[in-house]
Amino acid sequence: VQLQASGGGLVQAGGSLRLSCAASGRTFSSYAMGWFRQAPGKEREFVAAISRSTGKTYYADSVKGRFTLSRDNAKNTVYLQMISLKPEDTAVYYCAADEGATGWALYLSTRYTYWGQGTQVTVSS
C-alpha cells in the first residue's frame, strides 16, 4: 500500500483544514487507517484512527471535538477534518495504514505497517 497525504498548509488559529490520505491498491477497506503528528523536537504522537471494519473512530484527547476522521472506501481515501485549530496543532501530519491493527493497537505508531510522506500543518497565533 502506498499512501499520499495532502491538504496541509498555513492557517490562523481558529481556522480549519482538511487533510486527505489517498491509498493505492484494491483492498483499502481492509486497512485500518491512522493519523499521527510530529512537532519539532517532539515525539510522534497519535491523532486519530478509524477501524477497517466498523469504521469506529478513535481520537487523542487533545483533538477530540475538533477533529473528525472519516473514510471513503470507494475513493480509497481518508479525510481528517480539523476545525478550531490551535498553534499547538502545528506539526507534520502523517497517515498510516495496517491490516491487522485493531482496538488499542490503533493508538500505537509501531503497529502500523505503511506510512505516507507527511504534510505540514502550521497554525499561527
Image (tube, rainbow, N blue to C red):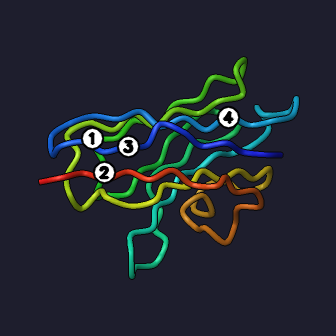
Distance of label 4 from label 2 (alpha carbons): 22 Å
63 w.r.t. 40: above or below: above
Q: Secondary structure at mark 4?
A: strand
Q: Name the residue carrying label 2.
A: 63
78 w.r.t. 104: above or below: above
Q: Name the residue carrying label 1.
A: 66
Residue drawn at 24 percent across, 51 percent down: 123
| Mark 1 or 4, nearer chain start | 4
Crowding near the residue tagged with mark 1, few <14, some 14–19, many ≥20 C-alpha atoms within 10 Å? some
Q: Position of residue 66 (x, y in %)?
A: 27, 41
Q: From the viewer's side, name the closer residue of 51 and 122.
A: 122
Distance of label 3 from label 1 (alpha carbons): 17 Å
**What count of labels does the image hold?**
4
Q: Depth-wise, is mark 3 or mark 2 nearer the camera?
A: 3
Residue drawn at 72 percent across, 28 percent down: 76
Distance of label 4 from label 3 (alpha carbons): 17 Å
Circles 1 and 2: CB atoms closer than 8 Å? yes
- Drawn side of residue 11 relative to residue 80, left or right: left
Circles 3 and 2: CB atoms closer than 8 Å? no
| Mark 4 or 2, nearer chain start | 4
Q: Depth-wise, is mark 1 or mark 4 nearer the camera?
A: 4
- Drawn side of residue 108 relative to residue 116, left or right: left
Distance of label 1 from label 2 (alpha carbons): 5 Å
